[in-house]
Amino acid sequence: MNNKKSPQISLHIPPKMWHQFHHTLLDARTNNEEVIGFLFCKCHQVSKQKIRYLPQSWVVPSPDCYERQSASELVMKQQFHEYLLETFLEKEQLDVVHIHTHSDRHKPEFSCVDDLYESAYAKFLSSHFKKKPRLISGVFDETFQHSQFRIWDRKGKSFESINCTQSWFELTQEANRDWTELMFARQQVFGEGVQKQLGELTVALIGCGGIGSIFAELLGRLGVKKWILIDPDRLESVNLNRLPAATQEMADQQWHKVHYVKHLIKRIYATGSAVKAIPASIADAAARQEVAAADLIVVATDNHSSRQVAQELALAYMRPLVCLGTHIDMQPNNTPRMYCRVTVPPLGGGWCLMCGNIINLHRAALESAANEINHLAAKVGYVEGISNPAVFWLNSLCASTGVGIIHSMLSGFLNVDNGLDWVYEFPGSNWLKADTNYLGTSGCYFCGG
Ligand SMILES: [Zn+2]
Ligand SMILES: [Zn+2]
């Protein structure tokens, strides 16, 4: 017997892409015939046990792309097929997902015809391309309610079932865990499913200072137990005005901020939590690898360059990103202007922190430049000093809103498929909500928007 455990394979389609793809598929159907569509994916080996396929592009052939199209048979034109292969397999080196529908209304099964065709196609793909692309196939019922997905081996001889997710988070719920904890009795109204997902969610928090620590305390209390904490800094006395439960003693002992936030989580969960504290910058290779494997990336740093890195990672590994920040400045007449901002770029691209002008690339570049250059720039007024004003209550407002948005993303009571960018302004007390249709520039270098 071979007891080597094969890795868990999944396909994660961003909700916005799924929405466009499946509506185009529905529109392509004129009568009752079967329709097909393709996704072209990058493969991310998360660990030895876990592989994710992440769609980069999709294509739904229009009727004129077919040689023959009927309820039982679909044959694409040679020229169109060659175009697909050349563009996505030869040039972009992607793997293929083949999705089609069956005209019934219950859980569909792959047919013998599907088996024959897909087996031959899997074999064709690996024998024609150096990179030996994999074939994943999916079949839906005509209502798109039920589906099955599988991945073929390169010889086209066997396949195994895989999971396909079309939401923000890819979570496998552990069946035999007890979720009836008394601790969450007062939030039962949001449903057992949401509580379970919170318990399964792994959050990578970049920045464990004034906003990050409150965020961790709030999301931890809501039910998140799995954390990856990233921050190179140590706790100082000047931080004590805004870090919950931080003490002078911790500052005297120069605790790393990641260990202080780990302490906050362990204070909530005496048992059952998993917290990785990484006292390094997000530029660190090990930190990046952990972030890429998380279910959600939250960036709460006070600089532009780490936010840029977080966004690049979120795009490269198709992870949901939540960006939190506050800003206080003084007007000439000595009245303060205070802002907090919560930004969630759409999963899988569309717009990002860079093309949405949420962060400033010029500043990011200066920040990540060598220290001496930074000093020079500061002298001529390009970079702000490190002593940015910060207060607990404004940070709390920002962190609370971020947690609320994540809670609603899981519950589905707020649709953020096109992303979200909210700015709160005090003392005017206005929430300014950006129209996400106007965010981003087409052909963005980072997200392809
Ligand atoms: Zn079929
Ligand atoms: Zn962009």
Image (tube, rainbow, N blue to C red):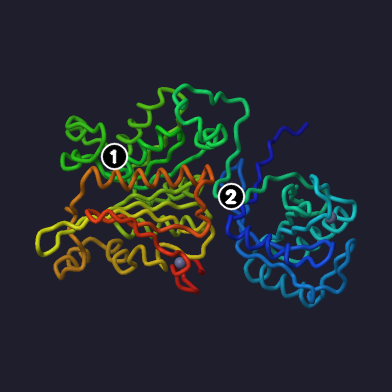
Instruction: In the displayed orientation, state which residue is furthest to the left.
Output: 333
Closer-to-camera residue (287/11): 11
Residue at horizontal 24 percent and vertical 56 percent from the top: 428
Closer-to-camera residue (114/196): 196
Residue 180 drawn above or below residue 40? above
Q: Position of residue 68 (x, y in %)?
A: 88, 71
State the residue position of label 2: 167
Q: In the rendering, which numbered label is found on residue 409?
A: none
- Disc 2 C-beta below 8 A from ligand 2: no
State the residue position of label 1: 257
- Callout 2 crowding tier (Cα within 10 Å): few <14, some 14–19, many ≥20: some
Q: Are marks 2 and 1 in contact (CB under 8 Å)?
A: no
- Kind of residue at disc 1: Lys
* Left or right relative to 98: residue 284: left
- Disc 1 C-beta below 8 A from ligand 2: no
Q: Position of residue 122 (x, y in %)?
A: 79, 58
SS at circle 1: helix
Task: Name which of mark 2 and mark 1 comes first in the sequence.
Answer: 2
Q: Position of residue 224 (x, y in %)?
A: 45, 35
Q: CA distance from mark 2 to mark 1?
A: 32 Å
How many marks the image carries: the answer is: 2
* Left or right relative to 68: residue 434: left
Q: Position of residue 412 (x, y in %)?
A: 54, 46
Indicate the quadrant where residue 386 lies: bottom left
Quarter that holds the N terminus: top right
Residue at horizontal 37 percent and vertical 38 percent from the top: 216
* Numbered disc in front, either 2 or 1: 2
* Left or right relative to 249: residue 190: right
- Kind of residue at disc 2: Ser
- Callout 1 crowding tier (Cα within 10 Å): few <14, some 14–19, many ≥20: many
SS at circle 2: loop
Residue at horizontal 37 percent and vertical 67 percent from the top: 357
